[in-house]
Amino acid sequence: MEQKLLSNFEQICKNQTKISLKSFSIARTLLVNPSTSDQTISSILQNLETLSTAVSASNPQFYHLHVITLLCEISIVRRHFSPRITTILHSLSLHCPNITPRAAGLALSTSVSIYPASASNLVSAFSEGTEGLFLSLCFGSCVPVRQRLLSDVEIFNVRPSLLLTVLTGFTKDPYPYVRKAALDGLIGLCKCIVVEDRGMIEGCYLRAVELLFDTEECVRCSAVHMVSEWGKFLVANSEGKSKRDWSDALYVQLCSMVRDMSMNVKIEAFNALGKLGMTSEYILMQTLSKKVLPITKEKTLHGQLSRKHSNLPASSAAGAFIHGLEDEFHEVRSCACYSMRMPAILSAGFATGALGLLMDVLNDDSVVVRLQALETMHHMAVYGHLKVQEMHMHMFLGALIDMNSSIRLTARKVLRLTKLHDLILFKLVVDSLIQSLEKYPQDEMDALSLIFDIGRNHGSFAISIIKEFFPEVDPSSECNWDFNNSKTAAHLVLAISIPLSHGKQQQLDSIPSIIYSYAVTILGRISRSLTGVMNQDTLLAYLSHCSRSSGPHLIEFMKGEDKMVEDDVATKIDTQITCPVSVRLDVVHNNNDGDFEVHDNADNYIKFILANIVQVWPLVKFGCIHEVLTTLRSWKEELATFITDPSCQSNSHLTFTSQYLDVVKLLSKAWWHVMCPMDLICKESGNLGYILQKLENKLRELQHRFIGLSKEEELHIQELTHVASTLKSSIFDESAIKKLQFFSLKEIIFHENIKYMDAEVDVGDKYKYKYKYNDWLNPIPFVAGLPVGIPLKIRLHNVPIETKLWVKMTMYEKLREYVYVDLKQFEGCEKVREFTFMPPFHRTPKVNCFVLRVCVGMECLCEEEVDGFRGHGGPTHELVYLCKEKEVFLSMVGKKG
Amino acid sequence: MAIDCLVLGAGQEVGKSCVVVSINGKRIMFDCGMHMGYTDHNRYPDFSLISKSGDFNNALSCIIITHFHLDHIGALPYFTEVCGYNGPIYMTYPTKALAPLMLEDYRKVMVGRGEEQQFTYENIIDCMKKVTAVDLKQNVQVDKDLQIRAYYAGHVLGAAMFYACVGDSAMVYTGDYNMTPDRHLGAAQIDRLQLDLLITESTYATTIRDSKYAREREFLKAVHKCVSNGGKVLIPTFALGRAQELCILLDDYWERMNLKVPIYFSAGLTIQANLYYKVLINWTSQKVKDTYATRNAFDFKNVHQFDRTLLDAPGPCVLFATPGMISGGFSLEVFKHWAPCESNLITLPGYCVAGTVGHKLMSGKPTKVDLDKDTQIDVRCQIHQLSFSPHTDAKGIMDLVKFLSPKHVILVHGEKPKMDLLKSRIKSELGIECFDPANTETVSFPSTHFIKSDASNAFIRSSLTPNFKFPKDEITDTPSLHVCDERVSEGILTMGKGQKVKVIHQDELVTMVGGGKTEVEFGYCFGLNLCSLKNVSKEVRVSNGDDSLLGVLNMKLSDEFGELGVRDCKGSLEVNSFRVRVCKNDDCPHRVDRDELSERLECVFFCCNWSILDKSIAWRVISVMKNMDL
């Protein structure tokens, strides 16, 4: 069939005097069928090539388009024909100058889109002409081609400076879709260029602002996006007061677009608003009120070029969020909810105002919008800006008995983080939770755990509720109380939470201890809800302890072995709660010499891994990479459960094994990439390079961060390093693979006394500076141009005194500084050395704030010297880093906010 | 050509909306309402102002009705059947369906009150037969020149804003509209149009309303609290609009909160109206449209028909009853039964006419209400006042005007002092001419009128290809980028005798006119003192040769205008189109201050020429040269 069609096709093509469309449809039929052989396609190409030159002779321009369309389709379906197609297209464009714009446009985009796969030398010849051809087609009179080329503008590799001019010009085109394409192109351009000229950025931004008033919806949509992107660009390129002015203007400009009539424009506007950061507080407050606030009344901001709207009154922002939240389309409402997150973080005042609106949104008819509103509240709660008041409670607690389970879940999520100011609120919450439990028993687990949490957070309120509740369950009161109902469960959980509450000086004695005995009767139910916090055994022990204690001060704990003050009960349980791992270990090895057994087990496990890892290697050679990776992963996970404190001696072995597993994993991956390539294209991609780089780093760490490695171990590591470098060279030189033919992983047995070098770095010295820790809210002050000292608290484990230690401070890739740490200056032993160090950072930039990434590294003295560091006064050898990079936040002195 | 806008009703007042607009020779009547506050001739607009002879069919091109409220449609049967108008009438489908109900209801009330009836039932039916129904965004060609189009206006079911254009003049009449959506109706929605005139309502010209959510919350909270305490809720409403709005709100809340308390509708108009809503889904809010496929939002789940026996049945319930102001009928009957009980709740509409029970309840907190001489009712129940309004607020009006940016705005349907405030805001904030004419006043202004012309091939060709430029803003010299696409400005409008108007490309002009190309050049000839020139550069050996003089000049100018490039052509210096040479001709036509300098021998004359493009450069050069003299 294939042959028949092909010969048919060739027949028609030969008959050059009368070419019909039939030939193209036959060719397409063949192309669409995936089982058509490459040979057939190749001969189709052959025919097309002759056809294209023949066509140019007889010159019916009509056929060019069909030939080129077909070529385009071939290039998509069979990518390996790309070089040939490029050649044909190239010759076509050379020999037929009077080709139609549509055909030329298609040829251009086809040849550009197959660029990476085709032969490089041909393309370079072609790409020189690309720019010119692109421009001439754009400036031609054929509008569809112009629109099409502009909408794919980024693939043509036109010089950015030229592109900026062309695209800005086309924003004035009379055809709306061309304007839209030009705007979209400019949006893309803004992300990938560096413009020095501020006037240029301003101009582009204002041009976009002008187009916000376009009559076409699609243009306005893109204009909103562009205003947002270029506005951010403009703000980033401004300094001082003008930065603030522009960011305010940008915010108000976008706010004014939320009153557009088109849904898409509104959505785009809110999406853009959600991404903006800095804005003046008064503008934020204005967005929450439809009435113009006195402070906004007279203010105007940077407007746009045309005389008509030459300035922008700040009152344009009035009620932007209110309008968004009561919009007709749920898409817009939900976007509006989302976009309130950022300002709610930045301004507490805004958060308070926004909360009132968001609470009302909980009455919305769309689930999506209600959910988004709750998520925004959760976000506010995370940043500590959620201040719930009694007037909100009706709506808020209504969400707890919502029909939709995800709404209920999210409402509980918010409640967990909510601080309740008085007993009335607390009572309302507990009552609503109980009501919700009665209505939706399926929520019990989460709801009870929430009650536990809020009980712990509001201990004193919980006590008074329990006091009221107790008479109801007291058997002496002779009421028929059903122990199995949700209300009792909820109250019992609340009672359990009280002794564990964070507040101090609880009046524990006022809680009748018998209540804990009641709790034991529904132990299963309670413990299921508290799985995340403690297991059933701990709970039982805790309950029995609480119920037996007669007085509040001296109570026993855990089988009468220890006597401790009640405050310590809380701390003891607290530590258990916060360290789930240790709880788990306790469960597994619940006897006195558990500690010993842990180590014993760990050692056995290490031995097991090291013995078996050798047997894994043949699997790698067979190409069963997935099985190998799964095995290694599960080993590593299990190993991780034994590691509690990396500085501990016995844990050094664990750490070593864990890192060794990483090395084997990476090696297997790299091996598989090189030895069993699926296809050649994959090999070229950066994936392998990335793996090999990671592998090298890991091996270097293995070699240098462990002290006390034996000769055999060092040899083993070096062998692996060689294998890695051979794999690397095999990318360019296939013969290198042969050298690896005989490699197989050997067993490694290591000796007792390895030590793991480690460093912990904390930023900020809590004694010297007022702030406790450093984050973006509490930055370290600096003066631009003057050096700034970064207070670091460094704790080193197992680092010998002769180690050459450096602190690396990176602002961005090219701006980094190294400071030498002379260990002899600090006290401490080799095992643990803790000190405060204040490295200076000299090249402070002229910005309001910036982030430094700080890291402690050790020079590998045995390796070759590296040139890259010279001249900066930095280390002369490669560094091995002893800790993870830490971010330090700095901000200019004397600028408030 | 001009637009004349004659306001027959709702000028600086609310009621009997009626505006007659003449636009490029066509005359359209927007709305034909009646005033509910009058019973005399003031009840209807003064139709005699349209045509003295009473020949309305020729005086008007068409009538457009925006929605079914009586103050917008009430006078229509009178105008068509009694005054005899027979021309086309346009309104939307829902308006056409619901208008007869409203008109008939009103007629019955009038007859019931014993007033003289203005039109009969047959009149209403005949009037409706003349109506053409239109759909949203449907282009309706009324006649060859006049085109109208309806846009969604919110407000009530079927309310529309109407766009009308005659040739190139276009206008929009909004009727009543709402810019914020309800539960059951959407917000007004319109395209960005090029308008000469916008006539907008201004009921709330100064009010700015808060979020509707707060009002909804208060309402739901009150109702929920009442029913959870076992009370009964009476919601007196009008049959159309608010009843549906509140019912959707409650039904939705009931479902969300899993409430089982029954909601009742008293029989009558409300149930009939619900039927219409169910059918006219396309005219409701987005949410109702979205969920329509699964469930019609007007098929209320928790709503049941009320039975009179349930009036004193125990247990909580919610009841919708007409009329809205408890002026009589069923809602008054229910009120008598439920008012004395403390746990019950009565919600009142935002506005009640004085004299009704609703009005008495609103004013203060009465404990007793006298129904008539004999009956007195103890009021112990709670009272909640609702303020849901289907009209846009001031901000909505401003937003709409800003969005449409018409050339002129006319405000109607509002109160005079508030309209004045809004008028001044529109003028000052948006820079748009604004009027608020009183009844029977006419406002006129020019309309847009385009002329058709031919275009030459060269002009069409040049218009097809992009031709944008980035001119420098020379006045302010700001660095900001300015784009202009000049392809249209390259055209020149020509009009030969007895020929059609034609646009040609500027390059074609010369060949078309047949004359040669003439350029205007400026000339200026002035004298300079030779001594001072010598002083300027002593190193140069000064001879009286002209070339060396120009050489000195060249040096000086190159210093000053280096960036423009000073060219030394034989015998003259050039900067762009500016040219200077030594002038030997004593009768040079460009020579200035001939008398003063002619006596002094040590004087050389320079003659300068330039074209208008380089005007500013030329004067700069000349001033530099003159300064050398000093």
Image (spheres, rainbow, N blue to C red):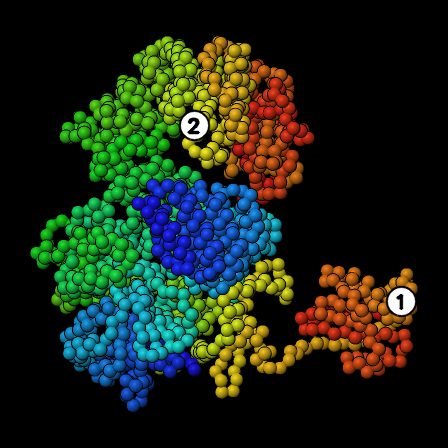
Mark 2–mark 1 distance (CA, rounded to whole Å): 90 Å
Chain letter of the residue beneath label 1 in the structure image: B
Q: Please, is residue A319 above or below residue A557 in the view?
A: below
Chain letter of the residue beneath label 2 in the structure image: A
Across and down, in percent, residue B220 comes to 26, 51
Q: Is B91 or A434 nearer to us in this picture? A: B91
Q: Please, is residue B136 above or below residue A534 in the view?
A: below
Tell me the kind of residue under disc 2.
Cys
Across and down, in percent, residue A782 comes to 61, 37
Residue A506 seen from this side:
no
Using the image, tell me which numbered label, if any, was put on residue A782: none
* Residue drawn at the location 29% of the way across and 42% of the way down: A407
10 Å crowding of disc 1: few (<14), some (14-19), many (20+) = some
Q: Quadrant of residue A705?
A: top right
Residue A596 seen from this side:
yes
Left or right, B295 with reference to B486: left
Using the image, tell me which numbered label, if any, was put on residue B534: 1
* Residue drawn at the location 27% of the way across and 68% of the way down: B135
* Residue drawn at the location 79% of the way across and 75% of the way down: B607
* Residue drawn at the location 36% of the way across and 32% of the way down: A457
Q: Which residue is mark 2?
A: A676
Across and down, in percent, residue B46 comes to 30, 83
Q: Quadrant of the C terminus of chain A?
A: top right
Left or right, A158 with reference to B407: right
